[in-house]
């Protein structure tokens, strides 16, 4: 236990209290008192472990010359009560990441859990209880130690006056987490009881066993087989040739059905067996995989438990049970309840491995009960599930030694409680207890992973993104490209003379463009200088000159080329699976583009596979060591650009072949991608109570090689260094481009208010570009202190700015609000100063709007940072759309507004009791004056059409602003609010500007390159139930976008053709995931019913028939289950 020496000298009593309490809790503490900067030297010189001793004997670990064998103590865990980085402590934190490699080596060698357990030195206990851990304190306890791979941070107490006091219950929590990890390590693998928890929300749409970018059934299969290899008891799964992860997921989906749950625990095995029989009879409502011998379950059996309310109270205790009863009455106990009133906990038992579905977070059709309100609780069955996972077998529970949450993301980390710094009343803290939580998480989402790590005690093990594909051109688009090529080669001429363009080619191109729905993307203008002269006629007017048509065909050719080269994620990733050579090619081509030809990509793979000189190991080791040195050299604050060194690798003592720098660089990337197998290695090491090394979260395209290899405990960035220099430059360019485009469309007028979405994910991955965009609109610049930390946003003088200050409505995600509290405070301070600046109102729209609000008697007229209620997350719009429980599209905007009415910042009490104050009048004013919304997209994997959050936030914000606009005399409808989209996943740009597109243009590009693209579709169909669900949820998102923006009719037409009306595809979808297929058809019918899609009658008749058949078959299956009672 590393303790501050200063606190001994100043006689802070908490140190003796901590040592005494830990001894009472059966932990032998070894207190080591340090000044703060030498923590790593203690680990290096004075500590050892079983792993370190064994490695030293084998010669695989080289001890430093300063190691003191006579003083070294063998430990099971390290607890740091100081925070900060391990190397350098408070001094080391001044240069983020500089000494991470040193810490990683020390902790890897020790291979024991590295905990943070500390009292708050910058906050009082009441402040923590009221608002969680705030500001700089969060950086000290969370952000900086996480760079070293620290886990399970526990707030042990805080300030009481000028003294530091412990909260004994929190010391008990730390002890229980230590016991959980150490006891697991001391248990032999064959005796360890492991729970694997899969995600399954929303219900009834085929979501069981799905996760973002991950093939969950395939990953479950790989995990179980690896566990068997490591000596774990997985029953006969690994030796049964018919066993599969798909079958386990299909069985779990049955156990998740309402009718099965209603029958109770003792009927569940019969329900699964009945479905197996139906699968063998070729029932299309049942996953075909269950037709395998034994259902493909590898001898797995249903393990189900009925838990009464009295039994739950005995586990939770009266205090927490009282809170549950208050939120969930006897008449409304939530999901997971049998007809007898018991809470059903179920899963498939495979030896000592229990595979289950994480309980639903709330009630379908009642989305406001779903998430995160501090005064609510999880429903009783949710509580019962986690309590019974931890209960011993003798007590009727599962007796888990650890839980593996397989895939991004689950829900336990989102439960009600403290935003940061769990206390006794935080539900994730209560339900996880001391259970080690090994959380398999997507490497490219360092934002939400923060919650999994901090609120859910997750030891993260990252998984790679799937291989990339290029959209290519298909069907009518491919034909159009051929027509354009033929025209440009043979047909074009100008008006002055020469051959005349063939009219049949002109007409064919125009007809093809209309069939493809490209007239909005590449409009043909009668007057190229007037955007209002776009041709919409079915027949091409003869008045279009040859010159005009030629230029338009050139524009069309450029658009087709961009669409053809557009990237998408091809399929899903299997956890721990090494990429094939073909898949490696896709990563390299996506990363380098035209910079590295295809043949050179092959050479890079060959260089890795077949080194010309020396052994393969020598080559790999040299490449790894060389680039590790490069990364260490430039790691300070993280590199602003993906790591693409421009150096020639010469032959190194004959070990490494001479090669061009790019091929050598690419070979290094291949080496890192080839280490994807370490994903499973890290899970196995964590299950043995070991250390999982840390890496920054991100993706190869945006962040370079610093995020590889995967299988790491991912972390975010130091929030006090945002925006970075690169983000500042790029964000400024984006803002200028948005202003330029707006003025071009509005006769040179500046927008008065722009809404900018500030999300944790894009802020982390782009190092703060969205923050830089806000600063650029306002006309402000970051000010750094000598250490490089941003301490203030200064207003640029108007004479230097050269334009008005634009007001900004900053829409904060809950994660951004909680993770970057320092940025929120700095922005709030900046807006306050701008609102009272000695400047004319017509050149300072912030001041103008603040004065108008003040005249109306509104408090805090400079409030500009709005988010969900404190400790709460999400707009709820996606839940409303998912349930279908809405009437007019305008209501979605009001749902967003009601969920985001809370103002944050330094002037809301500085994070104190007044933080998160509802200010509806200010928000209404800002929405009414908002003329444009700005959204960044930070990765290829998560585009506008791929996940629900974009329409649920950006789209709904747009709708909320439009709800407050006057009626446009020309259209008779509310005036439109534009959305500017910045695709920020290609790495920093060298251009003088940053590409900015309207949301409708991006939607069309995305739909054409992914959902409507047979190449993307077929890749998803190959993924079984998970791929079918990915298709299904994109259909739901399409309805969400059609409600909040504009989705072209051709998108719905082609979606119906690709997925419902294509009999072969429809059969594949239904066979893999019946519920997902039903949702596909349902969403198409819903779009027509809501007036979003004008479909032909025969198409609608066919869709209705498909839906009726699917519904009837599922109802028949349900009736069969009822009869098994």
Image (tube, rainbow, N blue to C red):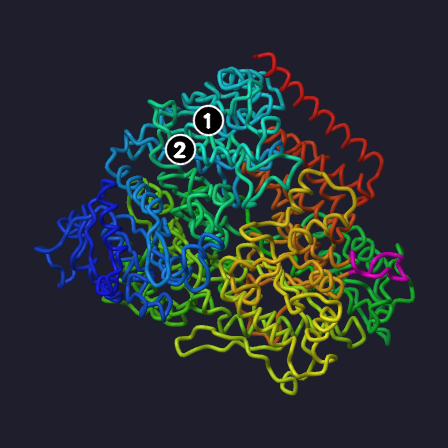
Circle 1/circle 2 CB separation < 8 Å: yes
Of the image marks 1 and 2, the number of the one nearer the N terminus: 2
Residue 980 position by quadrant: bottom right
Q: Secondary structure at mark 1?
A: strand
- x, y percent for residue 867: 61, 57
| Separation of residues labelled 1 and 2 (CA atoms) | 10 Å
Quadrant showing the C terminus:
top right
The total of numbered circles placed on residues is 2
Q: Which residues are magenta?
A: 963-976
Residue 971 is one of the magenta-drawn residues: yes
Q: Nearer the viewer, residue 486 or 340?
A: 340
Instruction: Please say if 728 is above or below 58.
Output: below
User: Residue sitting at 77 percent across and 48 percent down?
Assistant: 889
Q: Nearer the viewer, residue 101 or 991?
A: 101
Residue 259 position by quadrant: top right
Is 194 on the left-hand or right-hand side of 1040?
left
User: Residue sitting at 73 percent across and 71 percent down?
Assistant: 752
Q: Secondary structure at mark 2?
A: strand
Mark 1 neighbour density, 10 Å: few (under 14) some (14–19) many (20 or more): many
Mark 2 neighbour density, 10 Å: few (under 14) some (14–19) many (20 or more): many
Residue beneath disc 1: 347
Residue beneath disc 2: 195
Residue 989 position by quadrant: bottom right
User: Residue sitting at 72 percent across and 75 percent down?
Assistant: 848
Instruction: Please say if 259 is above or below 618.
Output: above
């Amino acid at each position: 236990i590393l303790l501050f020496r200063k606190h001994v000298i100043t006689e802070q009593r908490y140190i003796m209290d901590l040592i005494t309490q830990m001894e009472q809790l059966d932990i032998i503490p070894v207190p080591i008192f340090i000044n703060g900067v030498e923590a790593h030297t203690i680990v290096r010189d004075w500590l050892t472990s079983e792993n370190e001793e064994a490695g030293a004997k084998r010669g695989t670990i080289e001890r430093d010359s300063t190691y003191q064998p006579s003083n070294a103590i063998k430990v099971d865990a390290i607890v740091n009560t100081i925070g900060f980085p391990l190397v350098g402590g408070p001094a080391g934190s001044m240069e983020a990441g500089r000494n991470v490699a040193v810490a990683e080596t020390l902790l890897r060698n020790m291979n024991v859990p590295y905990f943070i357990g500390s009292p708050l030195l910058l906050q009082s206990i009441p402040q923590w209880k009221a608002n969680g851990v705030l500001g700089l304190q969060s950086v000290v306890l969370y952000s900086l130690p996480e760079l070293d791979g620290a886990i399970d941070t526990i707030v042990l107490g805080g300030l009481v006056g000028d003294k530091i006091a412990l909260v004994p219950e929190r010391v008990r929590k730390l002890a229980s987490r230590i016991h959980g990890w150490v006891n697991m390590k001391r248990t032999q693998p064959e005796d360890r009881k492991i729970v694997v928890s899969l995600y399954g929300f929303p219900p009834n749409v085929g979501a069981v066993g799905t996760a973002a970018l991950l093939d969950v059934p395939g990953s479950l299969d790989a995990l179980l087989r690896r566990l068997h290899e490591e000596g774990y008891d997985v029953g006969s799964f690994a030796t049964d040739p018919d066993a599969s992860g798909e079958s386990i997921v299909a069985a779990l989906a049955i156990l998740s059905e309402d009718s099965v749950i209603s029958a109770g625990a003792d009927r569940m095995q019969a329900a699964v067996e009945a479905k197996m029989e139906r699968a063998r009879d070729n029932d299309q409502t049942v996953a075909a995989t269950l037709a395998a011998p034994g259902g493909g379950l590898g001898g797995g059996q249903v393990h189900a438990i009925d838990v009464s309310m009295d039994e739950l109270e005995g586990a939770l205790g009266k205090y927490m049970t009282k809170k549950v009863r208050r939120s969930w009455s006897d008449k409304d106990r939530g999901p997971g309840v049998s007809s007898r009133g018991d809470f059903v906990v179920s899963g498939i038992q495979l030896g000592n491995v229990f595979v289950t579905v994480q309980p639903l977070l709330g009630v379908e059709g009642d989305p406001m009960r779903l998430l995160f309100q501090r005064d609510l609780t999880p429903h009783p069955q949710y509580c019962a599930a986690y309590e019974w996972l931890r209960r011993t077998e003798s007590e009727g529970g599962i007796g888990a030694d650890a839980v593996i949450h397989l895939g991004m993301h689950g829900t336990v980390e989102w439960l009600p409680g403290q935003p940061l710094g769990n206390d006794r009343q935080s539900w994730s803290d209560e339900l996880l207890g001391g259970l080690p939580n090994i959380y398999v998480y997507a490497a490219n989402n360092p934002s939400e992973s923060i919650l999994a790590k901090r609120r859910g005690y997750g030891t993260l093990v990252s998984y790679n993104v799937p291989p990339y594909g290029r959209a290519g051109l298909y069907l009518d688009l491919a034909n159009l490209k051929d027509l354009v090529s033929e025209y440009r080669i043979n047909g074009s001429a100008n008006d002055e003379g020469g051959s005349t363009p063939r009219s049949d080619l002109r007409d064919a191109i125009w007809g093809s463009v209309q069939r493809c729905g490209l007239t909005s993307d590449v409009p043909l203008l009668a007057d190229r200088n007037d955007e209002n002269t776009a041709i919409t006629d079915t027949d091409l007017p003869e008045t279009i000159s040859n010159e005009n048509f030629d230029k338009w065909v050139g524009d069309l050719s450029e658009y087709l080329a961009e669409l053809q080269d557009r990237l998408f994620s091809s399929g899903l990733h299997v956890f721990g699976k090494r990429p094939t050579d073909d898949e490696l090619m896709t990563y390299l081509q996506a990363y380098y583009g035209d910079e590295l030809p295809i043949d050179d990509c092959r050479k890079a793979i060959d260089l890795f596979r077949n080194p010309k000189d020396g052994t393969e190991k020598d080559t790999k080791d040299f490449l790894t060591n060389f680039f590790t040195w490069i990364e260490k050299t430039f790691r300070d604050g993280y590199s602003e650009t993906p790591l693409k060194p421009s150096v020639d690798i010469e032959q190194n003592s004959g070990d490494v072949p001479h090669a061009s720098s790019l091929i050598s660089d690419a070979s290094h990337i291949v080496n890192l991608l080839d280490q994807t197998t370490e994903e499973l290695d890290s899970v196995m090491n964590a299950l043995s109570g070991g250390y999982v090394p840390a890496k920054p979260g991100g993706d190869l395209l945006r962040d370079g090689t610093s995020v590889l290899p995967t299988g790491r405990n991912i972390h975010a960035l130091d929030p006090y260094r945002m925006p970075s220099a690169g983000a500042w430059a790029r964000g400024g360019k984006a803002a200028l481009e948005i202003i330029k485009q707006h003025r071009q469309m509005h006769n040179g007028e500046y927008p008065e208010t722009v809404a900018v979405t500030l999300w944790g994910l894009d802020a982390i991955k782009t190092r703060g570009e969205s923050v830089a965009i806000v600063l650029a609109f306002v006309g402000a610049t970051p000010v750094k202190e000598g250490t490089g930390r941003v301490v203030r946003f200064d207003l640029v003088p108007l004479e230097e700015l050269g334009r008005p200050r634009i007001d900004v409505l900053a829409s904060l995600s809950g994660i951004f609000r909680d993770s970057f509290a320092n940025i929120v405070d700095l922005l709030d301070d900046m807006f306050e100063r701008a609102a009272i600046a000695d400047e004319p109102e017509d050149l300072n729209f912030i001041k103008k709007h603040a004065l108008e609000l003040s005249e109306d008697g509104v408090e805090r007229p400079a409030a500009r940072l709005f988010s969900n209620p404190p400790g709460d997350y999400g707009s709820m719009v996606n839940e409303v759309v998912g349930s279908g429980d809405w009437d007019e599209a305008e209501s979605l905007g009001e749902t967003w507004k009601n969920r985001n009415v809370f103002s944050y910042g330094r002037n809301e009490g500085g994070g104190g009791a007044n933080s998160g104050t509802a200010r509806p009048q200010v928000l209404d004013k800002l929405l009414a004056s908002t003329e444009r919304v700005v959204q960044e997209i930070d990765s290829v994997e998560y585009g506008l059409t791929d996940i629900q959050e974009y329409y649920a936030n950006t789209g709904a914000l747009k709708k909320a602003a439009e709800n407050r606009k006057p009626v446009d005399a020309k259209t008779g409808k509310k005036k439109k609010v534009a959305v500017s989209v910045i695709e920020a996943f290609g790495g920093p740009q060298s251009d003088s500007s940053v590409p900015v597109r309207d949301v409708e243009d991006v939607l069309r590009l995305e739909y054409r390159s992914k959902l409507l693209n047979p190449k993307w579709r077929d890749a998803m169909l190959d993924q079984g139930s998970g791929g079918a669900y990915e298709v299904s949820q994109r259909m739901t998102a399409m309805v969400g976008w059609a409600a909040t923006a504009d989705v072209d009719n051709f998108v719905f037409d082609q979606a119906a053709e690709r997925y419902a009306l294509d009999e072969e595809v429809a059969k594949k979808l239904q066979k893999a995931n019946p519920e997902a297929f039903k949702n596909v058809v349902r969403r198409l019918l819903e779009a027509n019913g809501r007036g979003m899609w004008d479909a032909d009658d025969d198409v609608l008749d066919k869709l209705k028939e498909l839906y009726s058949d699917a519904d009837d078959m599922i109802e028949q299956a349900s009736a069969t289950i009822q009869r098994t009672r």
